[in-house]
Image: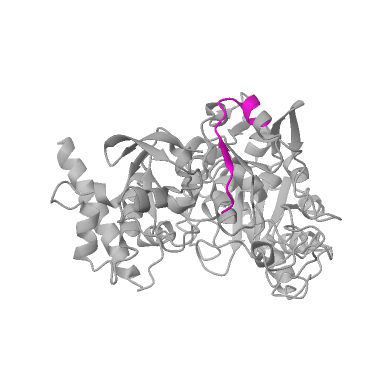
Amino acid sequence: MAFSIQMTLNGDKRRVDLDDPRVTLLDLLRERLDLTGTKKGCDRGQCGACTVLVDGRRINACLTLAASLEGATVETIEGVADGTELHPVQQAFIDHDGFQCGYCTPGQIMSAIGLLREARVHGDPERVREQMSGNLCRCGAYAGIVEAVLDAERQLAGNTERGAA
Amino acid sequence: MKPFDYLRPDSIDAAVAAAQAPDAVFLAGGTNLLDLMKGDVMRPARIVDITHLPALNGIERDADGGAWIGALVRNADLAFDDTFAHDFPAVAEALLSGASPQLRNAATVGGNLMQRTRCAYFQNTASACNRRAPGSGCDALDGLNANHAVLGWNSACIATHPSDFCVALAALDATVEIAGPEGRRSVALTDFHRLPGDDPADETVLARGELIVGVRLPAEAAALAWHSRYLKVRERTSYAFALVSAAVGLAIDSQGTITDARIALGGVAAKPWRARAAEAGLIGTRGGVEAYAAAGRAAFAEARPSGDNAYKIRLGQNIVARALARAAAGTPRELPALPGSPFATEAGELAHV
């Protein structure tokens, strides 16, 4: 049962052929579109390594059937930097040692970008911890991750203020 | 994952017709369905994708204060709808105490009602489970059953329903609106899920092909907004299912007398458990520590352990009493950083004064 869907992927509108409806968004990205930045951890929605943005919202790509994404906009870690300039959340993870082995990091960063778009952190580390709870880090870099998210929130707020001025 | 046919109908009627086929399931958020399909626990022959049906995606308010929530509304969208959360705060708190932000962005209202038990023996295809494989037995009875039911269970099944959202809906007299081959009908949420009975695999009142189109909350539910909370104890602070939870709502008149009381329990039975006798004991009283403790005892009067879970009875009594005390103190204007948690620091300012 072959068919195709139309989606916007990291800003590019494209038609994607699917030969099997069982393909998840995660497998589509990694195995068929060569976008291996999105990681497969548990493949069961528990670890958050596969977090991407669909229509601007963070979701688990492993629990999403690609076939259902007709017309969707998908953003992955490959699409967040502006050329060679890192996204403020990427830079904040480097500045605050928000990772060790790095395997969970693309998911952490996509989740943090989604969280900051949701705009409910208000500089509160407890809210960051709770609202990043869908992303596990087995190296235990949580302290740096929380600092990175709080720093990125401040920086993005500053950019908005400058942009509005 | 077993191969399946994939259909994407463009109307409710077409979706209902497509789901008449044997072993057909509806796909909405997919967060529970795909997980169970990957584990071979669910093996549908046909997936009917309803995610592109716009008629199921709204939150509507009635002139009298009630609400209609479309079956495809995402958990996060409902919890963060300010008007809705203001009028039905226990529903918002319950939603935000469940799952992870990623899952709440995908999971839907209808899917939450349809989610399957988290019993490990249901999830493991090597185990006997009357819910997954009727007639095979129940390995949970003599297994690791500390998380299992203390109300409404029998020797065929001791599993619990995992939802937080449904507990709040049960407390507030929500109804489920269903479309089927014979037309539309409504069922009280407290009648939607079945207790195990002779066939635990028969989990809900839905007939083959019937589709949840929405959930309705009556105006009386909004009248409880001043004193409405959800409290949930779990094995870790975030991103875990309830061991025991309670949704409560109170109406308190200007003299301090309780005129309406609602109590529903999660994590204790195969369905969200409404504790009506405990509610009746509160009405007409002025509340207080003793009255809330008595309500806790009444809520679990018929409870009995199904295994290594007698602790849930005492825990549940205390959760009911504490949830009532929190509700009586007033719904906070802003939910705590840890919604539904006993560890949350309480915000000072009230939402309704």
Q: Is-magenta flag for residue B3?
A: yes
Whether A18 is drawn above or below A29: the answer is: above
Quadrant containing the N terminus of chain B is bottom right
Whether A15 is drawn above or below B37: the answer is: above
User: Residue A74: percent from the left, percent from the top?
Assistant: 35, 42
- Residue shown at 72%/75% (left/top)? B143
Query: Which is more toward the observer, A91 or B34?
Result: B34
User: Residue B160: percent from the left, percent from the top?
Assistant: 71, 60
Q: Is residue B280 left or right of residue B288?
A: right
Total label count? 0
User: Residue B81: percent from the left, percent from the top?
Assistant: 48, 38
Residue A120 visible in the current orientation: no
Question: What's the magenta region?
Answer: B1-16
Q: Is residue B91 left or right of residue A60?
A: right
Q: Is residue B233 left or right of residue A68?
A: right
Q: Is-magenta flag for residue B203?
A: no
Q: Where is residue B245, by image quadrant? A: bottom right
